[in-house]
Amino acid sequence: EPVLPGCFLRAKAIGLMPMIDQGEKDDKIIAVCADDPEYRHYNDIKELPPHHKKNENKEVAVNDFLPASTAFEAIKRSMSLYADYIVESLRR
């Protein structure tokens, strides 16, 4: 079924794609829809078939894909940074 803009889906992180996009670190979490029968059986990025990203006329450097455990750590780190930001914002 098509996914409509603005809807919420449960996602399962299966990997991390470390990138340098226009000279800046821009890591991407690779996830599948946790409730989609076609994709929910994927648990790690190495299980996905090959894929090629269109470069959108930008200079993008992609290193090796990293496993789901690395994606989980990146998510935890991002959540912690966000929480720190919110706490600092409230103190002002």
Image (cartoon, rainbow, N blue to C red):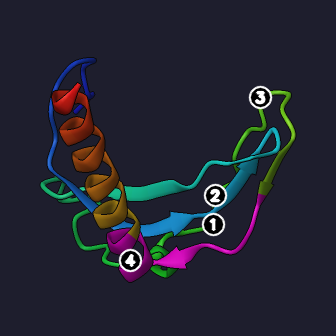
Q: Are marks 2 and 1 in contact (CB under 8 Å)?
A: yes
Q: Quadrant of the C terminus?
A: top left
As for residue 58 lying within the magenta part, the answer is no
Q: Quadrant of the N terminus?
A: top left
**Sequence order check: which comes first, mark 4 or mark 1?**
1
Numbered disc in front, either 2 or 4:
4
Q: Which residues are magenta?
A: 62-73
**Which amino acid type is shown beneath numbered disc 4?**
Ala
The residue carrying mark 4 is 68
Q: Mark 4 and mark 1: span between their CA atoms?
A: 17 Å
Asked if marks 4 and 3 touch (Cβ < 8 Å), the reply is no
Q: Is residue 58 above or below residue 20?
A: above
- Amino acid carrying mark 2 in the image: His
- Per the image, label 1 sits on a secondary structure element best described as loop
The answer to the question of whether label 3 and label 1 lie on touching residues, with beta carbons closer than 8 A, is no
Nearest-to-viewer mark from 3 and 1: 3
Question: Which residue is denoted by mark 2 in the rendering?
Answer: 51
Q: Residue furthest front?
A: 92
| Residue under pointer 3 | 56
Q: Foreground: 51 or 72? A: 72
Position of residue 5 measured from the top left corner of the image (x, y, whole percent): 28, 17
Residue at image mark 1: 50
Please tell me which residue is depicted at 62% across the width and 48% down the height of the picture.
26
